[in-house]
Image (cartoon, rainbow, N blue to C red):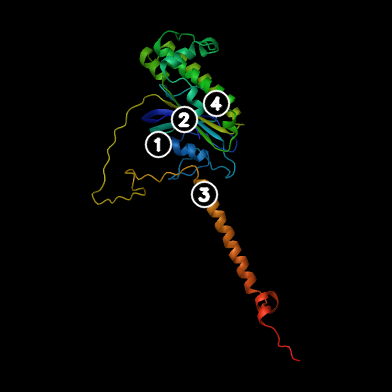
Amino acid sequence: CIVFVLLLAYVRGDSLTVLQAPEFVSFQKGKWPISGEKIPDLVALTMGFSVQEDLSWPGLEAGPLFQRPRANVLVVVRGADDLDFPQSVASYPLENRLYMLGKANAVFEDLPVTLQQIRGRLFQDGSVLATLPLKSLSRNAEADLLFLSEIQVLYDITALLQRHRHLAKDHSPDVYSLELSGLEELSRVYGQDSPQHRDAIALLSSVLQKFGEDVYNLYGNSAVVEVVTVKNFEAPLTRKSRSILESKQISNPGSPYNLAYKYNFNYAVVFNIVLWLMIVLALAVIAVSYNLWNMDPGYDSIIYRMTNQKIRMD
């Protein structure tokens, strides 16, 4: 399982766009709003996982039980309330809070993460600076380079997946969550009505369209690709309270956060060994008991034969 990024923010007037989805994952076209808090549940349901609370949202229909996508890609774009995609499956209004949590796979540790690494990657051969039309975007401005570096990362992720095709062919479902904040920085520096911001939106829309198609094809047309556009990110204000009569029920006494016990990699092996051994022993006991119950002591038991000798008469 592959997951990126931690997101926690309030979003208003934004949208969720489904770029790619297999035929067995049915998204209904409509303007039904979905809460940002339900995005993780939506991702889980598309992958066939269970959720704590039912998602009462008509945009997603129930799919076949034994046919599920092999990957889900969620891209969050900050700085725009909507993107114009040439092709998409469906689009829905987004409201309230968005929350995602994850950890990256070791394969993606080679991607550039620092500003210096990203700068070096942009000025290498075959980067987006040489292949994409920049128009009003500059090669020297910090905000422009931040935006272009995120575009470059999208291309690098696709290239890594093409080199490591075993990730797309294994039996473990993959979940990707990416956050792009370069567009928000361009909006802050140049303004939303600037040519740089308009050109960046057009460029990002085309790049995300291609990125979704590439990932969809890499997973054998069995991947869901969503794009969430968030114009304004605001830190949420929360208030927590609890009753003085509340009693703590901690499943793991060593953890104050009520976390479950950690399992090591041998847990599944030991569980299967114990399970099947108990099944085999139970079947053996049943078989032995059945044969003993239906045994004829005069013919089937050597004990009775040796102790039940007839007295020979001379």
Which badge, 1 or 4, is on the more N-terminal residue?
A: 1
Above or below, 279 against 185 in this view is below
For label 3, the SS is: helix
Which badge, 2 or 4, is on the more N-terminal residue?
A: 2
Callout 2 crowding tier (Cα within 10 Å): few <14, some 14–19, many ≥20: some
Q: Residue at x 54, y 37 (%)?
A: 173
Query: Which numbered dot is residue 270?
Result: 3
Query: Which numbered dot is residue 212?
Result: 4
3 and 4 marks in contact (CB < 8 Å) = no
Above or below, 99 against 275 in this view is above
Specify the farthest residue to the left.
244
The amino acid type, in three-letter code, at marker 1 is Glu
Which badge, 3 or 1, is on the more N-terminal residue?
A: 1
Asked whether residue 301 appears in the rendered view, the answer is no
Give the CA separation, mark 1 to mark 4.
23 Å
Which badge, 2 or 3, is on the more N-terminal residue?
A: 2
Callout 3 crowding tier (Cα within 10 Å): few <14, some 14–19, many ≥20: few
> How far across and how far down the image is residue 70, in percent?
56, 35
The C terminus, quarter of image: bottom right
Which badge, 3 or 4, is on the more N-terminal residue?
A: 4
Q: Where does label 2 land, which residue?
A: 104
Give the quadrant of residue 68.
top right
Give the CA separation, mark 3 to mark 4.
40 Å
The amino acid type, in three-letter code, at marker 2 is Ala
Q: Where does label 1 land, which residue?
A: 37
Specify the farthest residue to the front.
314
